[in-house]
Amino acid sequence: MRKRTKSREIAIQALYQLEIRSYGDYDELGIFFLQQTFDSNIVDFARSLVDGCRKQKKEIEEKIVSISEHWDLHRMAIIDRSILRLCVYELLYRNDIPPKVSINEAIDLAKKFSTEKSGQFVNGVLDKIYLQAKEKRHE
């Protein structure tokens, strides 16, 4: 497994924990990161993704809600929300990651950690966000 793929898996687990704790105590999450037995670069990248998602949470959620027709955030599966937040953060705020890589990784995460149809749902939302962001860059 590639290092960044593993980092994303760790980030999704961390975001899920934050979500079920209502974005509670970040110090507890520090313990989760310390318990990871992977290369420090893997954990550091995962932590940077989680930190970015937390800092940009409001804007990320506004973007997801504006794109996902007939779906409020609270109606989405928690893991799907976490995956969407992670990928939207990468799409909008991480120029060092190719958008197609972010989207493909998100789809794979949805297939691995969520329901049978989550990959399609995540792909549909992210494709719309990607196309919208791409259009804005060309204006």
Image (cartoon, helix red, strand yellow):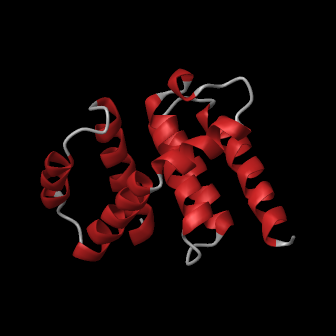
- Left or right: 120 as drawn, with respect to 106: right
Location of residue 24 (image quadrant): top left
Q: Residue at x 37, y 63 (%)?
A: 7
- Left or right: 116 as drawn, with respect to 29: right
Q: Residue at x 60, y 34 (%)?
A: 118
What percent of the width, then of the height, locates residue 114? Answer: 49, 33
What percent of the width, then of the height, locates residue 56? Answer: 47, 55
What percent of the width, then of the height, locates residue 93? Answer: 55, 66
Task: Work out whether 93 lies above or below 126.
Answer: below
Task: Work out whether 41 lies above or below 101.
Answer: below
- In this rendering, does residue 130 appear at all? yes
Task: Work out whether 27 lies above or below 96.
Answer: above
Q: Residue at x 62, y 57 (%)?
A: 104
- In this rendering, does residue 2 appear at all? no
Q: Choose between 115 and 63: the one closer to the eye.
A: 63
Location of residue 6 (image quadrant): bottom left
